[in-house]
Every structure is written in C-alpha cells, then in structure tokens.
Amino acid sequence: MSEFFAMGGRGYYVWMSYGITALFMIVEVIALMRSRTSVLKRLARMVRAEERGNSQ
Amino acid sequence: MAFKNSIAWYYFSSPKNFYPLAGRLVPWFWALSITLLVVGLYMGFFVAPTDYKQGESYRIIYIHVPAAWMSMLIYLVMACYAIIGLAWKLRMAEMMASALAPTGAMFTFLALWTGAFWGKPTWGTYWVWDARLTSELILLFLYIGYISLQSAIDDPRRAARASALLAIVGVINLPIIYWSVTWWNTLHQGASVSPTMEPKMASIMLNSMLVMTFAFWTYTIAVVLMRVRRTILERESQTSWVKALVGGQTENKSAGEKQ
C-alpha cells in the first residue's frame, strides 16, 4: 500500500497533480450546487415580494 | 425526419424548454462520468505498466493530456456557440458559451499545473517559456479575459456580444497550441497520439488515457448543463415560467427540484 503511494519516489509529483485536479473538479461542482440554491432562494424572495406588492 | 429534427432544435433553443431537458440529462452524464473515472483510474494505476524511461511519474499523463485536450475542445465549442449567438441572436447559444468558459479555464489551469508537476521530475524544471507552454498559458488568459469582460458589462446581451467577439478572435490560438510542437523546437515532447500516425505508446496506456478523456468530457457536459440552468434562471427571472417555478418551489420544494 505505502509502495503504491510512494510511486517509485515520485509520489509528490503524482499526488500533487491528481490531488489538485480532484480538488478543483469537486469544488467546482459544490460551488455550482450552492450557487443554484442561492439563486433559487433569491428569486423566490423576489416573487414573494412581488405577490405581496400586487395584493396590496 | 430532417423536418422533425429541425423542430426539435428550434424547440430546445428556447430556454424554457431547454431548462427541463438539461435537468433530465445531468444525472445521466454524472453516472457516465463517474463510471469512466473509476475505470480509467483503475486502468491507469493498476493495469498499465511502469514506463521504462520515466518510471511512475508518467502516470500524470492520464489527467494531463485529457485536461489539455478539454481546454482546447471547450474553447472551440465555446467559440462556435459565440458565433451562433452573434449570427442568430439565440439567447440559449449565448448562455451556453458563457457556461463553458469557467470549466474551460479550469481545465487549462489543470493542464498547466499537471504539466509543471510532470516537467519537474522529467525535465528538471516546473516551467519553461517554450511554445507549447506559452500558448497554453495564453489560452488561460483568453478564458480569464472572456469571463472578466462578461462580468464587467451589466447588460447581458451586450456582454454576450462583446465577449463573443473576443472568443472568436482567440480561436487563432488553438492551431498555434496544437502545432506548436511541430512548428517550433520545444522542450515539450511531440504528439503521442495524432490522427495521422500510429500512437507512440502502449495500447493499454492509450486506452486508459482515452477513457479518462471521455470521463472529463462527460464531466464537462454535466457541469456545463448545471451552470447553464442557473444562468437561465437568472436571465429569465422576469418570465412567468421562472416565477412559477421558483414560486412553486417555496411551497413544494421536492416538486420543483424534479424539474
């Protein structure tokens, strides 16, 4: 197992490449899901405010 | 048949109709992408042998080359949407172009990053100003320029037109990146895979790399469809269908999420 992570002495270079790639791809997806939620919340607030404005 | 197809294209060029279609496609592309990632990583790390010249550090190729290919492919697709958006004033094409840019920039950065961490053990340096590396860095600046130009202009239609022009002019950089290793004497190695030559690598290595490329490809489609759905909501926020969608979501969250 530790031999696998050592990558024949090149572990630092291999895992820095794979680690940062994985990090970026995961963070991109999480950021997108969070921004979708916040956009939906903001638009829902706008719609509710408009509905209140119309009923008054 | 052709008539039916053209109706479908027309139908889905409307944001209102594209939004639910994209929502249905996203989980399929996630499933495909994750499956391909698992298979590709397994092949790359456990089936493919150690390189006789470079040892284990060559395994960076399984993300470096796919990321570099995606960085160029995404730019090309983005420029095509930009042209369609300009020529036919299609809002959906404008939104697709801008949804592609962040993921394209990410893969460009990752191609440079993984290249640096492959270059250090192989060439003894993280960076050289060679034609391949420099033109790829220019691609990153083009993406960043495109994104910042778009966010600098408040009116979305004007932002789309201005950034589309930038994207189209920047296409000139793509053949420069692609052929840089043949036109100039670069430290970066020549193409390992090209349409006109026998691949210069073992077929298991080539196959792992292709599987990883399809994994990144399907990842890109999933992420871009997610991003374009968010953009549609923002840009169409004054339309009745978006109002009904987000309004319905506050009362019945699960029904809205399924859309």
Image (cartoon, coloured by chain):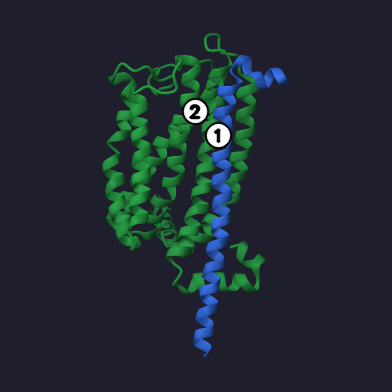
Looking at this view, name the residue that lies furthest to the bottom. A56
| Cβ atoms under marks 2 and 1 closer than 8 Å | yes
Looking at this view, name the residue that lies furthest to the right. A1
Number of dots carrying numbers: 2
Residue A17 appears in the figure = yes
Check residue B114 in the rendering and tell me which mark sits there, or answer none: 2
> Residue at left 51%, top 32%?
B213
Give the answer, above or below, for where B106 lies relative to B232: above
Q: Nearer the viewer, residue B8 or B2?
A: B8
> Residue at left 46%, top 17%?
B199
Give, as a three-letter code, the residue at label 1: Ile
Q: Is residue B205 left or right of residue B198?
A: right
| The quarter of the displayed image where residue B73 is located | top left
Give, as a three-letter code, the residue at label 2: Thr
Looking at this view, name the residue that lies furthest to the top. B52
Q: Nearer the viewer, residue B15 or B112?
A: B112
| The quarter of the displayed image where residue B90 is located | bottom left
Neighbours of disc 1 within 10 Å: few (<14), some (14-19), many (20+): some
Q: Which chain is green?
A: B
For disc 2, the chain is B
> Residue at left 34%, top 47%?
B146
Across and down, in percent, residue B167 comes to: 31, 45
Neighbours of disc 2 within 10 Å: few (<14), some (14-19), many (20+): many
Check residue A20 in the rendering and tell me which mark sits there, or answer none: 1
For disc 1, the chain is A
Across and down, in percent, residue B182 comes to: 31, 19
> Residue at left 46%, top 20%?
B119
Q: Is residue B181 left or right of residue B106?
A: left
Q: Which chain is blue?
A: A
